[in-house]
Every structure is written in C-alpha cells, then in structure tokens.
Amino acid sequence: MFPCDFLCNDRAKVKIRTLEWIDDIDGFLRLIDQRVLPQVLPRRLVYLDCHDVPTLAEAIRKLAVRGAPAIGIAAGYGMCLAAQKIDKQANLSDALQILRKQADILASSRPTAVNLFWALDRMMTCASRFLADNPGACLVDVQKGLLSQARSIHIEDQEMCRSIGEHGRRLIPEGGSVLTHCNAGALATGGIGTALAPMYVAHEQGKRFHVYVDETRPLLQGARLTAWELLQAGIDVTLICDNMAGMLMKQRKIDAVITGADRIAANGDTANKIGTYSLSILAAAHNVPFYIAAPSSTFDLKLAGGEKIPIEQRSPQEITSFGDRLTAPEDIKVYNPAFDVVDASKITAIITEKGIIEYPDTDKIAAHLGHKGQ
Amino acid sequence: MFPCDFLCNDRAKVKIRTLEWIDDIDGFLRLIDQRVLPQVLPRRLVYLDCHDVPTLAEAIRKLAVRGAPAIGIAAGYGMCLAAQKIDKQANLSDALQILRKQADILASSRPTAVNLFWALDRMMTCASRFLADNPGACLVDVQKGLLSQARSIHIEDQEMCRSIGEHGRRLIPEGGSVLTHCNAGALATGGIGTALAPMYVAHEQGKRFHVYVDETRPLLQGARLTAWELLQAGIDVTLICDNMAGMLMKQRKIDAVITGADRIAANGDTANKIGTYSLSILAAAHNVPFYIAAPSSTFDLKLAGGEKIPIEQRSPQEITSFGDRLTAPEDIKVYNPAFDVVDASKITAIITEKGIIEYPDTDKIAAHLGHKGQ
C-alpha cells in the first residue's frame, strides 16, 4: 500500500486517500468516488477501482476524481494500467504505440486542466527514455519504471501541497475569514490540497480563523467536498450559495479569497471553476485580496494570455436536473461552461510550491518558474 | 371566476392564473403551488386551495406563492378569508379585532417584502372605514366590501404590470440580451410581472431579443419559474447558474440586467432576492445598465436607506439538501439570507407603473411618487 496519510496528524485526525495505487505493477488505482459524497447512510466513503484506462478516463470525465492535481496523478497511474496491456512479446515501437493510444484516451477525458497533459507527457517521456536506454528490457522493467514515475508524481504532489501550505499560511488572517470556491483540497490532490493547504497548515499551527465555502454550482463541489473535508479536519466552516459572496464582502466578513487553478497562462491569467471570475471582480470591488494557489505544473507558458485557454462545456443536465428530478423545463437552452478565466490584474498573488508571486505578470512568473527569457 | 387571463394574447397563448379567488364572498383563494414547478409528469399545474388564513400564511411562508406583488394580492384575499370567520352576531369592535388577529398571522409570514404590509393596511383601513361609516351593516356587506377591495388590489396589480411593461419595453435592446434573476414575472404578480413585463410587452410588439435567466439558488426560482413562464410565452431564453453571469458580462453577452424588488428605501436602495447585490457590482464593473422594475407599492419611504430593511434568514436545509437527498454534510453551518440590498448608486433606473426614475435618489423618488418634501 502506498502511504498517503497526509492528513493524519494531531489536529486533523483524518485520512483521505483520494487516490491510491493498490499493490504492485499488476495492481490497480483506487479512487474515492467523489460523485457520491457526502454519503447519508452508511457514513462511509465509496471507492471506485480502476483496472483499465477506459474506466479511469470515464471516472475523470464523470468527475469521480477531479481537481487539476488529482487528475494529473490519476493520469500517471493510468499509464501504469496502460502498460499492463502491452503484450510480453511486443517490441519497443509496439509498446510505445500502445502506451500512446491509451494516453490519448486519457487526454480526451477533460480539456481544461493542464496537469493532465503534463502528467501524460512526463509518463510517455519516461517510457520512451527507458525503452531507448534499455532496448533489451523486459516488460516488467518497463512497468516498474512507469509505476515508480507515477509514484514520484504522487509524492511530489504531496510535497507540493505541503509547500503551498507553508508559503500560504501567513495569508490566512488570525481571527479573520477566508472564502474559497469549488474544491481545491485534499480531494483535489494527492496531498492537503492547494487552496486549502494554507488553511490546513494554519490550523495545525493553532491559528484561529473561519472559512466560508461557496457551494459551487452546478455540481456542488464546495458543499459536497470542501465543506466535508474542512469539517473532518475540525476547521470552522460556513456554507453559502455562490450568489451570497458579494453580500458577505459588503458586510466586510471576508478578509481574503483563495481558490485553486486549472491552468495559468504565462501572464498570470487563471482558469478555474466557473464563478471564480465573478469572485475576482467582487473581491476587487470590495478591496479584498484575491489569491490563487496552484503547483507550478499548472502554468502553461505556451499560452501568453488566458483567452486561449480551452473552456470545457458540460452537459445541460447538470443544471436542469438533480438526480432524477427535473429542476427546470426539460426543453430549456442551457449555457454550462465548467471554467472561467480570471484576469491577472485581479490577482493579488499566486501561491506555488516555490513561494508567492505578488501581483503576477509575465516577467515575475517566468522568473519564479526559472524560465527567465522564455 | 375572476378574470386574469393577462397572458392570453396572440403571441403568448398562455394563461397563468397565479392567484384566483373562486366564487363569491364564501369562496376561497386558489394558488398555483410554485413549489412543485416544473412538473415532470403529468404536465399540468398543481393548485393549492386556501380556505383559511393559517393555510395561506403557511403557503406564503413555504413559498407556494411568492413574489412581492403576488404576496400583497394574496394578503388582500387572505383578509376575505379572515372575514369569513366573523360571527354573524359580532359587533363592530369584535369584528375588527378578529380581522386584526388574522392580519397579524399573515403579517408574520415573511418579513422583507413591503407589499404584504401595504396590502394588509389597505384591507384593514377599508374594513374600519366601512364599519365606521355603516354601523348597522350586516356581515355580508363587510365581506362584500373586503372582496371588492381585494379584487381592486388584484386588478390594479395587473394594470401596474402592464404599465411597467409599457414604460420598460424601450430598455429591451433589439437583437440584444438581457439577464434577469429570480422570478419577477407572471408567477410573482397578478399580471405579466414586473422585471419580465418589459420583455412580454417587447415580445408582443415583435422585438427580437434573448433572455439569460439566473437559476437563483437556493430555491431555483429562475430555473423553475422564470425559465418556464418565458418559454410558455415563446421568448428565447437560456438558463445559467448564478455564478456564470460575470463571465457572460465579460464576453459582452449581456446588454442589460433587469430584476424585481421586494422593498425600496426612500433613497433607492433596493432589497431583492439574494444575489442581486453581486449582479449590481458585476454590472457596474462591466458597464452594463442595471434596472429595477417594481410597483410604487414596493417603496418604503419610512426607511431613508437600505441598511434598515429587515433581511429574512431562511432554513439551512434549503442549501444542504435537495428533496430528501443531502447535498452537504448534515452538521455544516449555513448562512442563508433570502435577500440582499443593492446600493442606489449602482441602479441605472427604476421602472414603476408611473414611469422611469433614472439614477434614482431621494428627491427623484419623492417627486416620482408625488410625495415631494416627505
């Protein structure tokens, strides 16, 4: 069993194994099925075991696993599932072709989060290099190499979350309140989250603060996931509807907004869950600092600005029904983008595992990532 | 049967009898039960018949009937139900006492919409005057007087809606798009609505435009009611989640925002469904005109500004569950205000049955209402 008891500490006695690779190279990926959170009865988590790539791609598409970093980790392990399909007699070129096809299936699952493509590239590069360097390697060696790489992605993600938490904790105001949107917590990562990491670390260190959570329509990731995991950790949390954030800011009840990110362009424009853009405008209008917390793998320096970030459009049924109950006229037209893009000019700072980029712009981001001149 | 086929015209062949007094003084109030809209199967409306004041008060509290003007009309008819409880042998003072007690039950149903109190005052004044002027009047005369008054409130409301529509139609941009929040339509009034009235009139007159409807969490009045009634009328409508409005404004897809109001203070500060405040800030940030449409009975000139408007807090279960399904941890704290208050400075114009108040302030509003110097 792969250890990821990152939330198992004195203050937050909770183990959330968002993703877990069970056993060795012939194993499988076990996910918390986030579609069925929170459970009413029985009070236990539901897991989804993925034994092949199509099952995992479907799990990503249907949001059983979601959150940009978690999708990246899942894709890494997905390539280990892909490697199980390689015939023992396959040659180097056949093996790579099989992996590429399976990677394409995973890549088609969701378009916006860049971590998915980043992880697939990393796994494919790993496989190519290994096979090129070891032309006589047996299949088991390839599989071991890939599993080791996937585990590295997972471990690095845990460390990344912790670092974001350490860098960001000073932004959590003692005795104050922060607002977050969607879920950028343990359930969105392999560790303690991105946007929630500063809260977990501040809480561990005894800081007292309050968290308002946007329920986050249409899929209620805030209500179902963020509220749940913050409660598990013993953090003081209040749930609101997305349309209440402005009123709270007017009442000066929000001292900071912190969200995650699905893709950040070279200039700092940031795609995140639909509603984040509105929050950034409301925060600016009320002089509330607006922070993005995300690993450096979320940056897509190939895109100069946010206007080129592809925005996933999702099914109308996410808005027009709840379970099997219709909540709107059946034949109504629906606009359902999964993400929107915050202008860099509205971001007070981006928190990464490397530190904090205040008032981000192209130069500061390049310097921060060590890509100066890119 | 009381005629209110206000939506029965060439273009919009729909009859929506939001409220209907059935028969004469010994009759009852029939409401469309808006809690169960939209119906999946069978495709018909569900009605709720109120034969006494407690049933009606509960219907108002539980939002079977809602919308500030409709609540006012319901309260008017409610006093006709109250009058049915007066003993035939009762004297003047006893009769008034019974009416007052029943009025108090209705007054306690919802705190924010001022039309409720306005209608109850009007009905009580009618009863007092009638009894004072006709000390020997029999009970039937009192009941007839009250029913006549309630019907007047209903008819005036229809006329008011039509006038708002006529004044406001020029604000609907030919070939453009408007955004509305919650339901301020036929289902919220005795007529063609307040915020939706300009759309109905513009549509009747052949203007082509598009309407975006905020679903309006937590109770989805936009998805369930506004989308439904605009579709019935053949108007081009797209449903969105509340948190998508900002992104649409950024894309310049919204040319105007029009909402109703539950109470307007003397200076123009306006209480309306939660989320309206955020919309007003987003509209201002994107240079989108922001309109309020409401009858003059919505003004509460006793309140100088919006900070004194009482804001109803509603049950956490509206946010934490859907039907019998839990959508958030059971023990989560919830903040659930039903309304927020838009600053007058963010309102481009208020449309009433008397005309349009551009950039409203205390003087313009007093002049518009004919209360100069108040």
Image: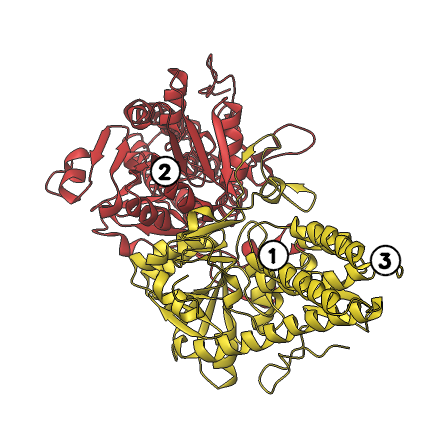
Chain colours: A red, B yellow
State the image coordinates of residue B5 (x, y, percent, origin top left).
Answer: 67, 79
Mark 2 element type: loop
* Measured Cα–Cα span from mark 1 to mark 2: 31 Å
Q: Chain of mark 1?
A: B
Q: Looking at the picture, does residue A164 appear above or below residue B317?
A: above
Q: Amino acid at mark 1?
A: Phe
State the image coordinates of residue A323 (x, y, percent, origin top left).
Answer: 64, 50
Residue at mark 3: B90
Q: Amino acid at mark 3?
A: Ala
* Measured Cα–Cα span from mark 2 to mark 3: 55 Å
Residue B138: name its quadrant.
bottom right
Q: Residues within 10 Å of mark 1 (few under 14, many from 20)?
A: many
Of pointers 3 and 1, the one earlier in the residue sequence: 3
The front one of B214 and B370 is: B370
Q: Are marks 2 and 3 in contact (CB under 8 Å)?
A: no
Disc ID at residue A252: 2
Placement of the C terminus of chain B among the 4 image quadrants: bottom left
